[in-house]
Image (cartoon, rainbow, N blue to C red):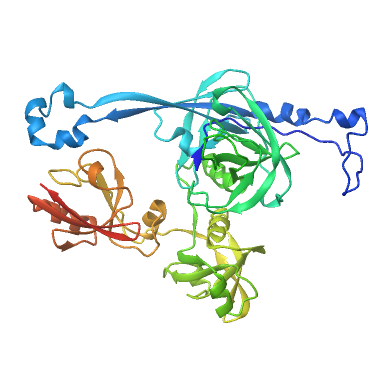
């Protein structure tokens, strides 16, 4: 899977062609048919697609090279010599964005501007503006930028209902593939609800054969009415070029991110289900007497889960939300994520062969314990990391199971921690001491050691480390 830095947007209106028998081939029957064009749609949509340029500083630390860890080499080059001194360099990236509000609100992909120190936006008329990042959301791979355009209304695209898309619908993509300049490509919706793309936590992508290439990330996928239906995000390719398999984030997900930015929020508050879910396999469907595999099986529920409070139990199968069928666990996650916090929705489910329904009020993940974010300092392997107490809210932010408890590495800024740990690591034990809080971690580290024996849970696997002091 490859990401695309690009620029996309465009839609062209097509007039109906003369009637042709389904089993026949025919050349255009008139001069009018030959001249059919997407140009009218492109003219109205392309001005709302922009280029996004970002720069970020990278630090090369030669002291992290394996040979610099050898005391023999350190005797000659030293710890503070110029050879071992970190060197700073600047990396640039190019992507696309879509103006969604005439006052200068722009949507792009998070990976286009991730860790950027400088972000600029170039409009279709070649004017450039410094951009402020309002929201950068790694979980959806979406970001919202703002440029200041006093006393001016910019061209903006209307966000369509992406749930209304059907396979076979015509779409256009506008972007800046390979940095060659704004380009428009056409195609159809090849598939919906693609769930194994691996780009974001919410796997529910639109697939299109409209040519998307590197440089198109953050660009627009538009329908024949000139409305935005998706943000182009990734391609499947072994060569790096388009092979007709591109993926876009549906606008119904984009709407939730834009709404947060418009309300002044700096972080996205998502509805929380508080459940561990899995797909219904053919074997499970057969054992439960289902006609076919469908829905999301509830494996476990957090006590504070809104599903649990509405009466659902472990073993129930969620079949639909607000009348929209749920085929997989990932689709349920997407449907929930595009629902407003505080909204009451109808959930249809199966229990012991009977179809039932109930009302569920969506809530944000609760912070049941104080997170107590603490930057770890001192002579220990955790120095430079921020540790936090786990609650459903913290677990949801980090993409961890709802019921996980203890202390987690929520951020790593610098220092020794960068070598040993990752964001989301749950610290289980330090030198034999079981940990259940940040205070317990600080107490264990305060004792000092010449050998640190550490156990962590990373992605469901328990890893044991032995690190010299």
- Looking at the image, residue 358 sits to the left or right of residue 32; the answer is left
Q: Residue 227: x, y in percent?
A: 70, 39
In this view, the residue in front, 168 or 307, is 168
Q: Residue 126: x, y in percent?
A: 59, 17
Q: Residue furthest top?
A: 126
Q: For residue 322, what is the image quadrant?
A: bottom right
In this view, the residue in front, 217 or 268, is 217
Q: Residue 298: x, y in percent?
A: 49, 70
Residue at the (14%, 62%) spot, across then down: 432
- Looking at the image, residue 113 sits to the left or right of residue 293; the answer is left
Up the image or down, 70 lies above or below 465; here it is above
Visible residue check, residue 161: no
Residue at the (54%, 19%) spot, across then down: 128
In this view, the residue in front, 312 or 341, is 312
Up the image or down, 366 lies above or below 118; here it is below
Residue at the (48%, 47%) spot, across then down: 268
């Amino acid at each position: 899977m490859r990401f695309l830095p690009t620029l996309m947007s465009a839609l062209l209106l097509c007039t109906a062609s003369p009637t042709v028998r389904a089993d026949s081939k025919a050349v255009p029957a008139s001069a009018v048919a030959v001249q059919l064009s997407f140009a009218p749609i492109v003219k109205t949509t392309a001005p709302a697609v922009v280029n996004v340029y970002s720069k970020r500083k990278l630090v090369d630390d030669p002291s992290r090279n394996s040979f610099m860890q050898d005391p023999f080499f350190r005797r000659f080059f030293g710890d503070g010599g110029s050879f071992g001194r970190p060197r700073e360099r600047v990396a640039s990236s190019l992507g696309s964005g879509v103006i969604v509000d005439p006052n200068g609100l722009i949507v792009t992909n998070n990976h286009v501007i991730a860790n950027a120190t400088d972000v600029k936006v170039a409009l279709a008329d070649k004017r450039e503006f410094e951009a402020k990042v309002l929201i950068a959301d790694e979980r959806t791979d979406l970001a919202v930028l703002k440029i200041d355009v006093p006393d001016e209304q910019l061209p903006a695209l209307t966000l369509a209902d992406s749930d209304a898309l059907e396979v076979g619908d015509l779409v256009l993509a506008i972007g800046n593939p390979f940095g060659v300049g704004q380009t428009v490509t056409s195609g159809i919706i090849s598939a919906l609800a693609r769930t194994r793309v691996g780009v974001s936590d919410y796997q529910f992508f639109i697939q299109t054969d409209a040519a998307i290439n590197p440089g198109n990330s953050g660009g627009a996928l538009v329908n024949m009415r000139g409305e935005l239906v998706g943000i182009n995000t990734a391609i499947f390719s072994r060569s790096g070029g388009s092979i007709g398999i591109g993926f876009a984030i549906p606008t119904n997900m984009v709407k939730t991110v834009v709404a947060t930015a418009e309300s002044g929020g700096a972080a996205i508050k998502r509805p929380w289900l508080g459940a561990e879910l899995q797909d219904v396999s053919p074997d499970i469907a057969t054992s439960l007497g289902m006609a076919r595999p469908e829905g999301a099986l509830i494996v476990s529920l957090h006590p504070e889960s809104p599903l649990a409070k509405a009466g659902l139990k472990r073993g129930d199968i969620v079949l639909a939300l607000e009348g929209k069928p749920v085929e997989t666990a990932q689709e349920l996650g997407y449907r929930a994520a595009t629902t407003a916090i505080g909204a009451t929705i109808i959930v249809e489910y199966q229990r012991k062969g009977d179809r039932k329904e109930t009302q569920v009020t969506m809530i944000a993940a609760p912070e049941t314990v104080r997170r107590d974010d603490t930057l770890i300092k001192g002579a220990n392997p955790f120095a430079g990391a921020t540790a936090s107490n786990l609650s459903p809210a913290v677990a949801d932010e980090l993409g961890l199971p709802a019921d996980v408890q203890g202390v987690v590495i929520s951020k790593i800024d610098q220092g020794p921690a960068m070598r040993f740990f990752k964001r989301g690591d749950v610290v289980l034990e330090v030198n034999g001491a079981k940990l259940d809080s940040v205070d317990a971690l600080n107490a264990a580290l305060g004792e000092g050691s010449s050998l640190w024996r550490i156990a962590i849970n990373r992605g469901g696997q328990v890893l044991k480390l032995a690190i010299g002091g």
